[in-house]
Image (cartoon, rainbow, N blue to C red):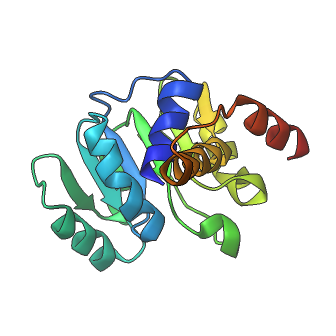
């Protein structure tokens, strides 16, 4: 998922990830798959917050880069200031659980990105727009870019994803 995420943000949306102060919500498998790619893409510090703080702590320990990656508590979000990138990797949109997020963690220049797409991303993206962010995206592009990367691994050529993305966006 990491290659697809970075390709979607950097290539499709033409946004530079380097140096971005990043907040990652969630600590499950998809998040575990994107953290190394985000670090390789040059994001600055990464704060990982999970509703189960032990999972965030365990993930940070596995990553093993304490200077760049740390866990924080959900209850402390309002005290952390604003972030340059907020990435939702939780399952909240699929389960109907509302993410209670303070508006203070984002501003108009924050990239708000939900790894989910379709109905599962609606609430988080609405929150992102309500913060005033002008850069709010769902994970459809991540899915398409990751599929293209898988195709490249199997067939030795990476397909152009523009038409596939545009068609799926029209259907959504």
Residue 39's image quarter?
top left
Residue extending farthest to the front is 155
The residue closer to the viewer here, 162 or 132, is 162
Q: Residue at x 34, y 42 (%)?
A: 22
Does the rendering let one see residue 102?
A: no
Q: Position of residue 143 (x, y in %)?
A: 62, 50
Is 9 situated above or below 127? above
Q: Residue at x 37, y 37 (%)?
A: 83
Residue 12's image quarter?
top right
Q: Position of residue 8 (x, y in %)?
A: 55, 36
Q: Residue at x 47, y 63 (%)?
A: 30
Q: In the figure, is residue 129 to the left or right of 62?
A: right
Q: In the figure, is residue 149 to the left or right of 169?
A: left
Q: In the figure, is residue 123 to the left or right of 90?
A: right
Is 50 situated above or below 119? below
Q: Residue at x 56, y 49 (%)?
A: 155
């Amino acid at each position: 998922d990491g290659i697809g995420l970075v390709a979607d943000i950097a290539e499709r949306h033409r946004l530079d990830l380097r140096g971005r102060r990043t907040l990652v919500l969630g600590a499950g498998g998809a998040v575990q798959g994107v953290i190394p790619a985000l670090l390789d893409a040059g994001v600055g510090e990464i704060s990982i917050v999970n509703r189960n703080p032990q999972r965030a702590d365990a993930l940070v320990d596995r990553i093993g880069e304490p200077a760049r990656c740390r866990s924080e508590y959900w209850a402390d979000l309002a005290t952390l200031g604003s972030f340059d990138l907020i990435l939702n990797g939780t399952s909240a949109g699929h389960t109907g659980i509302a993410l209670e997020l303070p508006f203070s963690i984002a501003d108009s220049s924050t990239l708000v990105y939900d790894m989910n797409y379709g109905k599962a991303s609606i609430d988080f993206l609405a929150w992102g727009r309500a913060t005033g962010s002008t850069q709010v995206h769902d994970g459809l592009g991540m899915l398409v870019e990751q599929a293209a990367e898988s195709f490249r691994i199997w067939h030795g050529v990476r397909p152009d994803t523009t038409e596939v993305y545009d068609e799926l966006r029209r259907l959504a």
